Image: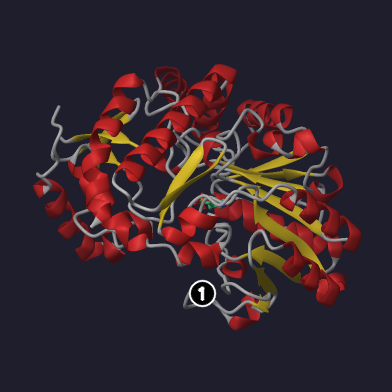
Amino acid sequence: MSVTTSNATTSATAFARAQAVIPGGVNSPVRAYGNVGGTPRFLASARGPYVTDVDGNEYVDLVGSWGPALLGHAHPEVVDAVRDAAGRGLSFGAPTVTETDLVDEIRSRVPPAEKVRLVSTGTEATMTALRLARAFTGRDLIVKFAGCYHGHVDALLASAGSGVATLGLPDSAGVSAAVTGETIVVPYNDVEAVEAVFTEHGARIAAVITEAAPANMGVVPPLPGFNATLRRLTLTHGALLIQDEVLTGFRVGYSGWWGLEGLREGWSADLHTFGKVIGGGLPVAAVGGRRDVMNLLAPTGPVYQAGTLSGNPVATAAGLATLRLADASVYARVDAVSAQLRGELTAALSAEGVPHAVQWAGNLFSTFFGADAAAHGARDYAAVLATESWRYAPFFTSLLESGVYAPPSPFEAWFVSSAHDDDAVGRVVAALPAAVRAAAQ
Ligand code: PLP
């Protein structure tokens, strides 16, 4: 095992080869290190809290495949379940009992998901949720929040910045203004802006979609009562509330963010989307919710949705094994590791005099740099964009060279797992002083 990772020769060769034939050399943009510079590490294997690259460097992993690796990588029981399933056939295009078992597991943890449809990606889940909401309400407009990510659904690639809510403009080339014109983008955590949108457009709004706790602009937790206000306003105006728990679901707790907030406060969304953890590292996502809304899906109802690999037997076996292992002790460990790392990060940054805010939602966390963030926190996307995010690249690079694989973007959450033992945590802590010095410059 090496503790420094200056050797990225094989990764560099692999990246050059990939760039010739894959746009940007990657199959999902953040992997290209555009935000942090340097050579993206091509990974060869992963086990527990560690990933190993093609040059043989081992890193403590703080990405966790962007969420699925709640138990760490290659948990033996999950791998066994995958092997068993694979041995019985890779894909049938016909129903299997495992799909219902997985849905039952999801429903037992989030009972408001009365019925659940399995899909392969979070993008499909949110896309289907929008279609359902429009069909159920007979309305067209969708309200989303600036800085919230719901996958690459055309209508949700609008993020019109801060201030008063505006009708969204396309964020991505290739998305027509007609599509995003039906999406209203509102600053996150801004109750008055949401109220204003409902006052003006209430009778035309099909749904409000929100990350249950945003973690795709860095972690920006909902202010107390914000989600409950969304619930109240949508009910008042006959719109549906879609809580996107693709990232938070079964990661921040046994029942996801709903378990931390909605369950305690006595409310739930009409539709919930899940992904990541429910596939345990293989492609499974889901949309679930009210029976009357979900029954609109074909073949019971008129809303078309389908997938060749939906409910794939190997993927659902991985998800089911993961969820069955994810008991209270798993969440206690993940929470404890998160709290410890947050404390260490705060202490290291303070010791070096780097103004910062370490923000968290459940066990998800991220660091914002700058005096404003330190003074007020970053409560919406505009505040996030005003942080000193340029400090992140040297911070990240130093961590990487010390054997810590942090997310290659300042706007992503950090993920830990129940496999992060004291040794793994200790390696991160040992890497912090140099990283913080790099961030201070
Ligand atoms: N919704 C949220 C909250 C997400 O974090 C993501 C992905 O990061 C998605 C939806 C899209 O999921 P996928 O990448 O599986 O399409």
Q: Is residue 335 above or below residue 218?
A: above
Q: Nearer the viewer, residue 114 or 219?
A: 219
Q: How is the image coloured?
A: secondary structure
Q: Is residue 151 above or below residue 255?
A: below
Secondary structure found at label 1:
loop
Residue 297: x, y in percent? 76, 51
Q: Quadrant of residue 428?
A: top left
Residue matched to label 1 = 171
Q: Is residue 181 left or right of residue 368?
A: right
Q: Nearer the viewer, residue 131 or 329?
A: 329
Tell me if residue 367 can be seen.
yes
Quadrant of the snapshot with the N terminus: top left
Point 56% across, 55% down: residue: 123
Q: Farthest bottom residue?
A: 177
Q: Hey, what amino acid is under mark 1?
A: Asp
Quadrant of the snapshot with the C terminus: bottom left
Point 72% across, 31% down: residue: 107
Q: Quadrant of residue 207?
A: bottom right
Point 43% across, 56% down: residue: 411
Q: Nearer the viewer, residue 295 or 251?
A: 251
Q: How many marks?
A: 1
Residue 388: x, y in percent? 38, 62
Residue 311: x, y in percent? 59, 38
Residue density around tag 1, few if under 14, some if 14–19, many if 20 or more, within 10 Å: some
Point 73% across, 60% down: residue: 208
Q: Is residue 224 above or below residue 441?
A: above
Look at the numbered disc 1 and say if its residue's Cβ is closer than 8 Å to ligand 1: no
Q: Is residue 261 left or right of residue 33?
A: right
Residue 218: x, y in percent? 48, 53
Q: Nearer the viewer, residue 262 or 138?
A: 262
